């Protein structure tokens, strides 16, 4: 187990998973505070009546309703949406001790409490899903391929980089009668890999979904399933022989900080998704911020799972 934890791709996935879990934890705590504040606003509002809207506007309404004793009370209610039309009959909840504290449908405290509950639940489910996926991929992409039987004879491969959308990945293309494309997690060794290079494959490249590749003394782990068709995107081939600059780059470790800088483009979609959600949900800036933070964190994690390539 310890040897696996030293692997660059494992550390990359673990760090990005920690970012996701931290983002989920922060959002969960914020939503708990929002829920507690909303609950405090509705505490004591237990009596029911049927009232009439006497004034309506954008984000607020004034309602008049009968209270115990036969008198009429008037209350201003903050709303999370447009108010009903003047003269509309609406159910009213109010505080018997202070009838001016009242709520109707779509009142801000009620909507805030419901939204906070939903967001908090989503973050818990998302965090559990991240842990489950990490555990599953750890055994399928690292433990099982490392223990698979090696091929009896080396096969020639060439390293290609494929950029599709905001993500760039490394693939090993087999030079066989029926070529296959093996996605692998990034290693500096890939930078200076001659084209072609003979490698040993652990697993059956034709039948197995996930295979590891031995390049010299290093084992490259699969970042996905073997493909029988060329991956779509902008392709960049390694040169037949690495120049001096590539040879030096292949000999130097690539820090995770550089990996994270290379993953920054995947965050471009986060504010857009957040804006779309805030518009659809009507949650405003707070909803935009929550969704943007979660999408950005999951973007980092997704890039790590896919095996993003930070090489130039």
Image (cartoon, rainbow, N blue to C red):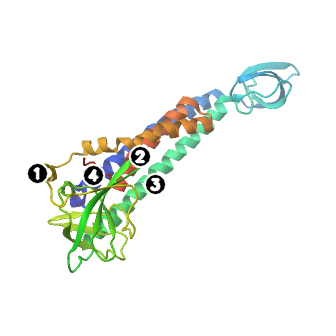
As drawn, the residue found furthest toward the front would be 240
Crowding near the residue tagged with mark 2, few <14, some 14–19, many ≥20 C-alpha atoms within 10 Å: many
Q: Position of residue 273 (x, y in %)?
A: 51, 40
Residue at (46% x, 54% y) in the render: 129
Circles 3 and 2: CB distance less than 8 Å? no
Circles 1 and 3: CB distance less than 8 Å? no
Could you say whether the residue bearing mark 2 is in a helix, strand or loop? Answer: helix
Residue assigned mark 3 = 129
Residue 193, image quadrant:
bottom left
Residue 279, image quadrant:
top right
**Observer-nearest residue: 47 or 83?**
83
In the rendered structure, which disc, 4 or 3, sits on the residue that comes first in sequence? 4
Q: CA distance from mark 1 to mark 3?
A: 44 Å
Residue 239 in view here: yes
Q: CA distance from mark 2 to mark 1?
A: 34 Å
Crowding near the residue tagged with mark 3, few <14, some 14–19, many ≥20 C-alpha atoms within 10 Å: few
Residue assigned mark 1 = 244
Compared across the picture, whether 76 is left or right of 292 comes to: right
In the rendered structure, which disc, 2 or 4, sits on the residue that comes first in sequence? 4
Crowding near the residue tagged with mark 1, few <14, some 14–19, many ≥20 C-alpha atoms within 10 Å: few
Residue 43 in view here: no
In the rendered structure, which disc, 1 or 3, sits on the residue that comes first in sequence? 3
Label annotation for residue 123: none
Crowding near the residue tagged with mark 4, few <14, some 14–19, many ≥20 C-alpha atoms within 10 Å: some
Residue assigned mark 2 = 299
Q: CA distance from mark 4 to mark 1?
A: 29 Å
Could you say whether the residue bearing mark 3 is in a helix, strand or loop? Answer: helix
In the rendered structure, which disc, 2 or 1, sits on the residue that comes first in sequence? 1
Tell which tag, 2 or 4, sits nearer the viewer.
Answer: 2
Label annotation for residue 11: 4
């Amino acid at each position: 187990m310890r040897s696996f934890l030293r692997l660059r791709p494992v550390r990359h996935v673990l760090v990005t998973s920690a970012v996701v879990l931290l983002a989920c934890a922060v959002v969960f705590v914020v939503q708990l505070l929002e829920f507690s504040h909303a609950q405090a606003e509705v505490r004591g509002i237990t009596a029911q009546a049927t009232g009439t809207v006497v004034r309506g506007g954008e984000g607020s309404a004034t309602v008049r309703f009968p209270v115990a004793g036969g008198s009429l009370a008037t209350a201003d209610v903050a709303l999370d949406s447009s108010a009903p039309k003047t003269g509309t009959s609406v159910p009213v909840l109010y505080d018997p001790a202070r009838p001016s504290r009242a709520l109707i449908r779509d009142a801000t405290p009620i909507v805030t409490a419901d939204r906070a509950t939903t967001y908090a639940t989503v973050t818990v489910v998302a965090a559990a899903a991240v842990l489950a996926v990490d555990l599953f991929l750890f055994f399928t992409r690292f433990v099982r391929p490392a223990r698979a039987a090696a091929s009896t004879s080396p096969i020639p491969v060439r390293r290609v980089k494929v950029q599709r959308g905001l993500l760039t990945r490394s693939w090993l293309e087999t030079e066989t009668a029926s070529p296959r494309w093996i996605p692998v997690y990034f290693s500096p060794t890939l930078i200076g890999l001659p084209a072609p290079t003979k490698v040993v494959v652990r697993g059956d490249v034709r039948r197995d979904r996930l295979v590891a590749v031995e390049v010299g003394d290093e084992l490259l782990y699969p970042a996905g399933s073997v493909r029988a068709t060329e991956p779509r995107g902008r392709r960049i081939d390694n040169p037949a022989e690495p120049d001096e600059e590539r040879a030096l780059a292949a000999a130097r470790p690539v820090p995770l900080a550089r990996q994270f800088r290379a993953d920054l483009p995947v965050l471009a979609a986060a504010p857009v998704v957040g804006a779309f959600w805030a518009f659809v949900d009507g949650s405003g800036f707070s909803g935009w911020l929550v969704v943007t933070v979660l999408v950005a964190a999951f973007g980092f994690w997704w890039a790590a799972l896919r095996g993003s390539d930070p090489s130039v």
